[in-house]
């Protein structure tokens, strides 16, 4: 065989949370997959995300939940498990459980070619991979989503600035989610462990301001501090002690909810998951959690399809296998689309309310919203994406 072409049964594009959880779910079921990652190493950049109860159920199913619990503080919010987790530690925990060689680095996907039931994947280095199943977990600019003709995510007009404050000894903050609202902005602070606190700030700036805070981390930090003059000094101190090189600003995007339910998110033996499927605003804190749900659900339905023994001869078996794969991906799409529609819609509306401006809207938000917000967080986290079929 030409060394520039390889054959793989299952190829996953993107070694993020969705891609790694899908690969690990398949591996737990006895199925090997290859992850294509465009970077030259595991991408552990990014900060933290709030992992609610639904995320911990998925992490437990994948066998990494207890390892991550030991590294993160349990937040005090009642009966629901919630921890602010470092994305780096989650990604590493998932990758460490995969067999050696599961991730191929420096392998950016350029284009997809149909060849019978198979797909030919043309990579940036000139090589080609032939695969039976293609799963796009390649983020908001997904090549696979474009091939499926799923409309691109849209800008919300909002910008998020995030940072992580490190305390060499330990901080004195309680294990709770602090959240503040202002005229047109929202910010929050969550302890990750005894020595670090994650914070975020979202607003709808003018175009000139947005260009400034996105071009310079120091400008972004100064802008956030200028908006938080009325916060307690100890809370402002979290942002002050954050090193500039770990302050990051980016525009918030989402895939319009009707593009999730009204379009086919799978076609034959191709589908998408994670941010390639459902980028959403962070207001419901379900982006990372739902990516883990995607991985478990996708692995379960694909595993059930592939582990059934085909009937008849080899040729008949190949056709039957393709139909089973197609049906499995259709089940995945059917199970996920309405939950994702609801998560994306609710998150966007919450952001609009929380980041409101004007005296009347601010009064209603500040007096009535905090208790309702917690109930919404708990409602949407009270979900179990199910277990894996272990042969």
Image (spheres, grey):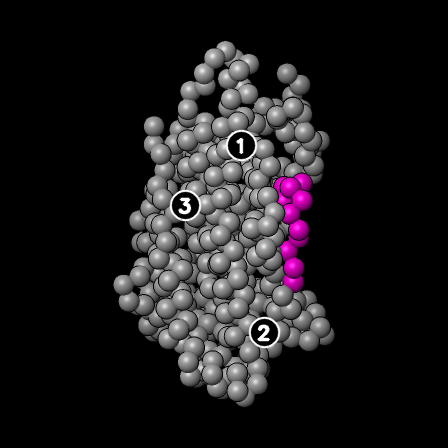
| SS assignment at label 3 | helix
Which numbered disc covers residue 326?
1
Residue 148 lies within the magenta run: yes
Mark 2 crowdedness (10 Å alpha carbons): few <14, some 14-19, many ≥20: many
Q: Judge left or right: residue 8 versus residue 155.
A: left
Report the residue marked by disc 2: 203
Name the N-terminal-most of marks 1 and 3: 3
Whether residue 125 can be seen here: yes
Quadrant of the rendering where the N terminus is positioned: top right
**Label 1 neighbourhood size at 10 Å, few (<14), some (14-19), many (20+)?**
many
Residue 289 x %, y %: 44, 54
Name the secondary structure under disc 2. Answer: strand
Task: Measure how far apart labels 1 and 3 are at the Cα level.
Answer: 30 Å
Residue at the farthest left position: 79
Check if mark 1's residue and mark 3's residue have beta carbons within 8 Å.
no
User: Could you tell me which quadrant the C terminus lies in?
Assistant: top left
Secondary structure at numbered mark 1: helix
Q: Does 295 appear above or below 354?
A: above
Q: Let me know if residue 376 is in the magenta part.
A: no
User: Label 2 vs label 1: CA separation?
Assistant: 42 Å
> Which residue sits at x=50%, y=11%?
313
Magenta segment: 144-155
Nearest to N terminus: mark 3 or mark 2: 3
Of residues 304 and 40, the one nearer the viewer is 304
Q: Which residue is mark 3?
A: 93
x, y percentage for residue 219? 63, 73
298 versus 187 height, above or below: above
Question: In percent of the image, x 42 and y 84: which residue is there?
Answer: 367
Q: Is residue 68 visible?
A: no
Between label 2 and label 1, give the one nearer the viewer: 1
Percent x, y of residue 334: 49, 44
């Amino acid at each position: 065989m030409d060394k520039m072409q390889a054959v793989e049964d299952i190829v996953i594009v993107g070694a993020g949370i969705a891609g790694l959880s899908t690969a690990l779910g398949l591996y737990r079921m006895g199925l090997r997959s290859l992850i294509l990652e465009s970077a030259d190493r595991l991408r552990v950049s990014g900060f933290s995300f709030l992992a609610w109860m639904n995320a911990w159920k998925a992490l437990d199913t994948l066998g990494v939940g207890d390892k991550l619990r030991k590294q993160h503080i349990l937040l005090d919010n009642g009966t629901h498990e919630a921890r602010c987790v470092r994305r780096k530690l989650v990604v590493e925990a998932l990758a460490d459980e995969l067999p050696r060689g599961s991730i191929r680095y420096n392998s950016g996907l350029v284009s997809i070619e149909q060849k019978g039931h198979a797909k030919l994947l043309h990579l940036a280095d000139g090589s080609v991979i032939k695969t039976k199943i293609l799963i796009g977990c390649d983020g908001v600019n997904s090549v696979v989503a474009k091939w499926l003709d799923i409309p691109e995510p849209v800008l919300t007009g909002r910008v998020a600035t995030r940072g992580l404050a490190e305390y060499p000894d330990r901080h004195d903050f309680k294990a709770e989610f602090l959240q503040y609202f202002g005229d047109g902005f929202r910010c929050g602070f969550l302890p990750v462990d005894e020595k670090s606190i994650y914070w975020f700030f979202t607003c709808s700036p003018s175009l000139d301001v947005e260009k400034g805070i996105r071009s310079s981390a120091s400008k972004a930090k100064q802008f956030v501090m200028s908006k938080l003059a009325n916060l307690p000094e100890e809370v402002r101190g979290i942002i002050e002690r954050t090193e500039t090189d770990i302050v990051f600003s980016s525009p918030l995007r989402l895939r319009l909810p009707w593009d999730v339910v009204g379009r086919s998110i799978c076609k034959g033996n191709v589908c998408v998951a994670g941010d390639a499927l459902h980028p959403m605003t962070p207001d419901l804190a379900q982006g990372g959690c739902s990516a883990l749900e995607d991985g478990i659900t996708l692995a379960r339905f694909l595993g059930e399809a592939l582990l059934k023994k085909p009937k008849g001869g080899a040729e008949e078996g190949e056709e039957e296998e393709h139909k089973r794969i197609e049906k499995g991906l259709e089940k995945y799409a059917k199970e996920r689309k309405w939950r994702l529609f609801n998560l994306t819609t609710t998150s966007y509306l919450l952001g609009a309310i929380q980041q409101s401006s004007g005296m009347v809207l601010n009064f209603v938000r500040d007096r009535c919203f905090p208790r309702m917000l917690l109930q919404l967080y708990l409602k949407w986290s009270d979900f179990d994406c199910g277990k894996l079929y272990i042969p």
